[in-house]
Image (spheres, rainbow, N blue to C red):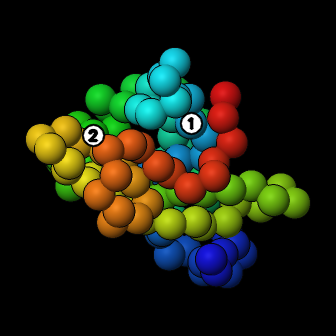
Amino acid sequence: MAFVTQEDRKMAKWADYGISAVRYDSNDEYIDQVKVHKDNGDSIGAGETWSRKEVLSKMDDSKTFVTILKNDDKWKKGEDVHIITVEGRRFLRTDANKKSKDNLENLPRF
């Protein structure tokens, strides 16, 4: 996976929001909460804890999300986040795999 750092961005937004960490349910299948940061174009905002439902709602309103990782005090863009529907249930994924499980890469857990 190729990463783009904030310094490489030159004021271009990656998405409306970045997700930097996840918390899964007790079965480790569904995301319960995520750490979300507003993408300001030239910087990444402070993290807020959002529910899975809040992320899905924002995506339904055409807001975009990417995964982001911090390395050497610089944010790096990961993958685009999509909603994949399997057997009528919606999942947050960074790939198009039709597995009935949320998957946002290997983001740190909180």
Badge 2 element: helix
Residue 54: % across, % down: 32, 31
Amino acid type shown at disc 1: Val
Q: Is residue 50 above or below residue 14?
A: above
Q: Viewer-proximal residue, 74 or 104?
A: 104
Residue 40: image location, x then y, percent: 51, 57
Which residue is drawn at the image coordinates 27% and 52% (left, top)? 83
How many residues crowd around disc 1 within 10 Å: few (fewer than 14), some, or many (20 or more)?
A: many
Query: In this orientation, which residue lies closer to the viewer: 80 or 95?
Result: 95
Query: Is the residue marked by circle 2 packed among few (<14), some (14-19), or many (20+) residues within 10 Å?
Result: some
* 63 horizontally vs 86: left or right: right
Left or right, 29 with respect to 75, comes to: left
Q: In this view, does 24 lie above or below 41?
A: above
Q: How far apart are marks 2 and 1 (CA)?
A: 14 Å
- Secondary element under disc 1, as helix, strand or loop, is strand
Picture coordinates of residue 20 (x, y %)? Answer: 61, 46
Quadrant position of residue 7: bottom right
In the rendered image, is residue 46 in sight? no
Q: Quadrant of the C terminus?
A: top right
Q: Mark 1 points at which residue?
A: 22
The residue shown at (69%, 42%) is: 108
Looking at the image, residue 74 sits to the left or right of residue 91; the answer is: right
Q: Is residue 81 above or below residue 61?
A: below
Work out whether residue 94 or residue 55 is closer to the camera in this orientation and state it. 94
| Residue named by callout 2 | 56
Specify the quadrant that holds the N terminus: bottom right
